[in-house]
Amino acid sequence: MKGMVIIMSIVTIIGAGVMGSAMSFPLSDNGHTVRLVGTMLDREIINHVIDTLYHPNLKRSLPNGIECHQLETLENAVTGADLVICGVSSFGVEWFSENIIPRLPPSVPILSVTKGMFNLPDGTLMSYPKFYAGKYPDRSFNAIGGPCTSYELADRDFTHICFCGQNLTKLEEMKKILETPYYNISLTTDIEGLECAVALKNAYALAVTLAVGLSKRSGDTIHYNSQAALFGQSVKEMRKLLSLFGYADENIIYGAGDLYVTVFGGRTRMIGTLLGLGHSFDEAMRELEGVTLESIVISTRVGEAVQTLINAGKADSADFPLLLHVYDIITNGATVDIPWKAF
């Protein structure tokens, strides 16, 4: 950034998916050494980037000078690293915890791009940074929240996101490493609140995009009135969920923004549209076989958490008609029948 002195750092990204790989753009633009490590699922991607620089899933060439590693050379990739970025999906969080964190230098902070939460038996939710910290209390775990799609980050389109962590000094250091004129960063120590807000967006983006499929049933025209109604109800329910779990209402800024960008593109839009078109949940999942669907994970976990709280008399089902309908579609195979009058 203009007027800012940037100290060159070594940053290792673990996970060569679209978002992890897209993080190489602000890092490279700031002149840092970027090392991209593929998981066991990313072998072909890493080989392709080594040969051509082109990322077949991100559909863009990665920055010149990026160093690519297969998982077998992880130790070399993290030697001398100032920051490790965790780029795995929700499906890889436990694997990352068990197989990767023990192999990382203890003093190096970890910044996660993964959005999601675990639901606990008592109906509460737990962020991924808190999950990691429970297993490795002496390490620094941080995460990113806010509206940022991998494709547009790679295109250097302006976005405003938030880093969360326990230590503001460490967050400031990470901000200096990553902030660019197009990648604007706020900071917060409210890890659970931010992570809950941005995780919820995947569940509610699925809900909003049901309307895309419903409108396509009657023709090619995409209608926005119904999407807007679902968007408004989604934000209302997200705020109620933040309150229910004891998190600050201001986090809705990042959750609503993230909801907006997710509705207009990506994998969640695909599953919501198929369901709205009339496919059963099983049919839609078969059609999208091989596609990572974070929305299904978080919809199921939050739905289970809320249902637990409802059964315990700690929540009211009338407050969450849209979430519970999505949960019913996923867990019971219910057909799409949006409960408009319950809004």
Image (cartoon, grey):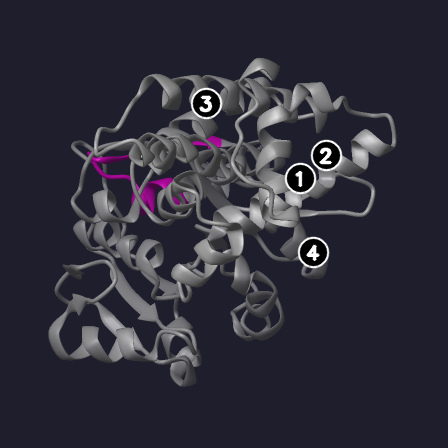
In the rendering, at what x and y percent does residue 208 appear? 43, 30
With respect to residue 84, does 203 lie above or below? above
**Is disc 4 placed on a helix, strand or loop?**
loop
Few, some or many C-alpha atoms within 10 Å of disc 3 (few <14, some 14-19, many ≥20)?
A: many
Query: Residue at label 3?
Result: 230
Choose mark 4 or mark 3, whichever is in front: 3
Q: Provide the residue designation for mark 2.
A: 306
According to the picture, the residue beneath numbered tag 1 turns out to be 303
Query: For the magenta stretch, what is the residue range?
Result: 174-187
Does 237 appear above or below 213? above
Q: Position of residue 254 (x, y in %)?
A: 44, 28
Image quarter in which the C terminus is found: top right
* Label 1, label 4: how far apart the Cα atoms are: 29 Å
Please determine whether, in this image, residue 68 is positioned above or below residue 214: below
Element carrying mark 1? helix
Q: Amino acid at mark 1?
A: Gly
* Residue at the front extreme, as displayed: 218
- Nearer to the camera, 286 or 184: 286
Task: Name the residue tied to disc 4.
Answer: 137
Name the N-terminal-most of marks 2 and 4.
Answer: 4
Q: Are marks 2 and 1 in contact (CB under 8 Å)?
A: yes
